[in-house]
Image (spheres, helix red, strand yellow):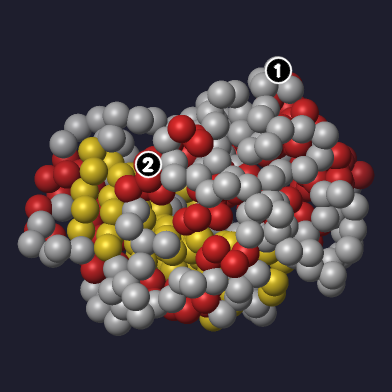
Amino acid sequence: MIESVSRTTSQRVGVSDGSVTALVCTRDRPESLVRTIRSLLASDDVQFELVVIDQSDDPESAQSLAPFASDPRLRHVRSSSRGAGAALNEGLRLARGEILAVTDDDCEAPPGWVAAMVRVLGEQPTAAIVFCNVMASPHDQRAGYVPAYQRRRSRLVRSVGATCAGHGLGAGMALRRDVVAALGGFDEALGPGARFHAADDWDIAFRVLLSGWHIYETSEVSILHHGFRTFAEGREHARRDWIGIGALGAKLLRARHFGAAAVLLWEFSAHALWPPFADLLRLRRPCGLARIVGFVQGLGQGLHMPVGRKTLLFGQANLEQNLDVLPPVKAPVDRRTGGDRDGVNIHR
């Protein structure tokens, strides 16, 4: 089992003490980055710093932030690292806040978004992460789509099995810095730009749940996503997503978290295997085969990579040498959850 982290270490976090960091990781998206930064800095209802981790190949992103240079809240950091996980971990190291509100460089935050995310997390003392609704920006639905996630009602996720009802997106996330740091940070092998190009948000959510903490998904807060993809781009995006999901499944198997791995097997069966099989039953050309190929590819590659039993990080990516990691402390038992050693109760 992942080393547990004491919940009491994070219950001191509040909005009034200014211990809040908004974090944006970016690479080669100067125009959309400006929109994201402008929307975040438009909020003044809570004290926060805004950290931008810039992995861009050229100086255009840095130059695009020149109009905001006079705002003391903004900290722009050029980074030679690659991958979303590495950028998020750099943000964790540099953040002064105890709560981090994280979004992507193609999102637009409404006024008060940072304060709302911090408030929701403060109202959920057993939750280490809050996911908000990620709304698709207006677009031509005949030409493509925008990845989104929307819940009609808020819910507290107490087990990995409960994620079968949906997974929040890292584009709208708030987290307790000390908890994530104590788990070793984000896995740098997962996420856009990394070896496995997706599932970084799934991974941190699973590891938080396995450590004894909860996830909260709020329907009261939302952020706008401008990440339009054509359907052709979407097919490649789906393949990359399922490579990451397969790699996450391999990680759980190697670490002997069989209950949690069974949840991903259910996801694979329901959302990758069944759709093309249903097409065949209807005498239609099967669609979505890239999901199957991607999952098998990620699973095979992941099974050949070492995994830390305590942190559930791939390879030697244990960040304890680089992060201010809290000592592992057994998390309080939530007697409402029950379940096996993974805290998994598969139900729908």
248 or 235: nearer the viewer: 248
> For mark 2, does the 10 Å Cα neighbourhood hold few (<14), some (14 to 19), or many (20 or more) residues?
many
Q: Looking at the picture, which amino acid does disc 1 mark?
A: His
Can see residue 84? no
Measuring from the top left, give residue 306's x and y in whole percent.
67, 22
Can see residue 309? yes
Position of 291 with respect to 13 (left or right) is right
The image quadrant that residue 179 belongs to is: bottom right
Position of 268 with respect to 86 (left or right) is right
Measuring from the top left, give residue 12's x and y in whole percent.
49, 72
Position of 277 with respect to 226 (left or right) is right
Tell me how many marks there are: 2
Which disc number belongs to residue 292?
none
Point out the image quarter for the N terminus.
Answer: top right
5 or 220: nearer the viewer: 5
| Tag 1 residue | 304
Q: Are marks 1 and 2 in contact (CB under 8 Å)?
A: no
Q: Looking at the picture, which amino acid does disc 2 mark?
A: Glu
Query: Is disc 2 placed on a helix, strand or loop?
Result: helix
Measuring from the top left, give residue 139's x and y in whole percent.
43, 62
From the viewer's perspective, is residue 195 above or below residue 22? above
Tell me which numbered mark, 1 or 2, is placed earlier along the sequence: 2
Nearest to viewer (mark 1 / mark 2):
2
| Tag 2 residue | 90
> For mark 1, does the 10 Å Cα neighbourhood hold few (<14), some (14 to 19), or many (20 or more) residues?
few
Query: Is disc 1 placed on a helix, strand or loop?
Result: loop
From the viewer's perspective, is residue 49 above or below residue 66? below
Give the Cα separation between the discs numbered 1 and 2.
27 Å
